[in-house]
Image: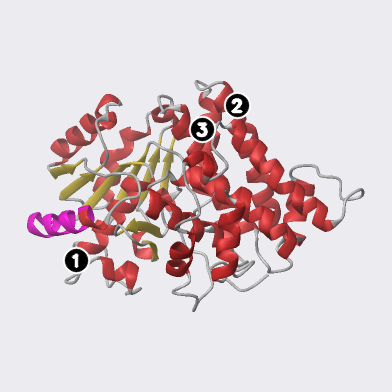
Amino acid sequence: MINFQYYNPAKIVFGSGSIEKLGCLLKEANATSLLLVYSGDFIKELGIYESVANTCRELGVAFYENGDVVPNPSIELVRKLSVFGKEIKVDFVLAVGGGSAIDTAKAVALGIPYAGDVWDFFEKGILPDVAVPVGVISTLPASGSETSNCAILSNGEWKLGFEDDKIIPKFAIMDPEYTLKLPEYQTACGVADILSHLLERYFSDVKHTDVTDYLIEGAVKALLVNGERVIKSPDDLNARAEIQWLASIAHNNLLDTGRIADWGSHRIEHELSAQYGITHGEGMAVVLVAWTKFAATEKPWKLSQLATRVFGVDSYNHSESECAAKLSAELEKFFRLLNLHTTLNELGIDNKDFNAMANRATVNGTKTVGHYIPLDKAKFVSVLNLAL
């Protein structure tokens, strides 16, 4: 285990009717001018929009809103809302939805007090002096962004992440009832996204990490069980509650403590979703099946451990490499149960852009991505080829 510091001040309000606490939460944040960031009319159908507007009216908080968020959120909207936020002196940004809305809100929170272009944070790694406070009402369990210090944005060519504790939301309202009407595909992609966050952290070269190893393994088991339940019984509120809580657990950085996570698979998927606009969760399903095939031959030990402890692969009758190789098949089986694609061919993607994506990710071959297995340009392309 390596040394670490852990910090996460996000207040979590979980359960049915938890939006009733919104007024108290906004008072605690001293909000006077609120910008609501969301996507589409579903928040009006769920009654969230009306609840937020009424709460602001009762508190005397100026209320502004924008519902133009799209999947794989873009810098253009963030720039527009940052300028707007400066003009109307927004002092609180409230996101309603999943990772796209939350990451947009976080980026706007960076942009409002910043004199330059908000893309500077993502491209140049500039650290903010201050950020406008952010709150979240989560309706799509997936990204875990509701309690994380990270935001992901795209400029049309690059899909980049930024991390800083100043953008950890002040609060996250999580009501599983809001997830009951999610289409099966969105639910499945959310489950795949959560699993990817758990596995990226699990694949670590740091030894003596029993605490977080067993925590991650337990979370993976819980996700496998409840992912299957919610696909078979979409109205199972208990299963949806488990999945919603797992989304936060998987990405609030507690499971990073004492270890170095990989994140190579995410870097590959970010290239795919930037290039083709695919849904992140399904993209991660495709990449994880391919990456684990590749990793089984490169460095099998951690994959073998997971296959044995979680999927019951018999380590007595199989070598370490054989156990590791079986992990890819187990993951593909689960993703198929979720009715997700697991190959690029199924998504209509061929190999013509592989070199261009690998060049972007590795800065023309001068850098590697991932920590458990550092991927140079050639290895990056190898994983993509295994995903076909």
Regarding residue 73, the answer to whether it shows in the image is yes
Evaluate if marks 1 and 3 touch, with contact meaning CB atoms under 8 Å apart.
Answer: no
Q: Residues within 10 Å of mark 3 (few under 14, many from 20)?
A: many
- Residue 199 position in % (x across, y down): 61, 53
Location of the N terminus (image quadrant)? bottom right
- Residue 114 position in % (x across, y down): 20, 69
Camera-side residue of 147 and 125: 125
* Relative to 50, residue 265 above or below: below
Left or right: residue 125 compared with residue 255: left
Q: Amino acid at mark 1?
A: Pro
Evaluate if marks 2 and 1 touch, with contact meaning CB atoms under 8 Å apart.
Answer: no
Tell me the colour scheme of the image.
Answer: secondary structure
- Residue 291 position in % (x across, y down): 62, 55
Q: Amino acid at mark 3?
A: Ala
Residue at image position (33%, 70%) is: 123
- Residue 247 position in % (x across, y down): 50, 44
Q: Report the predominant secondary structure element of the magenta stretch.
A: helix
Label 1, secondary structure: give it.
loop
Q: Which mark is residue 229?
A: 2
Q: Which residue is mark 3?
A: 241
For residue 98, what is the image quadrant?
A: top left
* Relative to 31, residue 242 above or below: above
Q: Amino acid at mark 2?
A: Arg
Camera-side residue of 364 and 351: 351
Disc on the earlier residue, 3 or 2: 2
Instruction: Measure the C-alpha gap from mark 3 to mark 2.
Output: 12 Å
Give the residues in magenta: 77-90
Left or right: residue 303 compared with residue 244: right
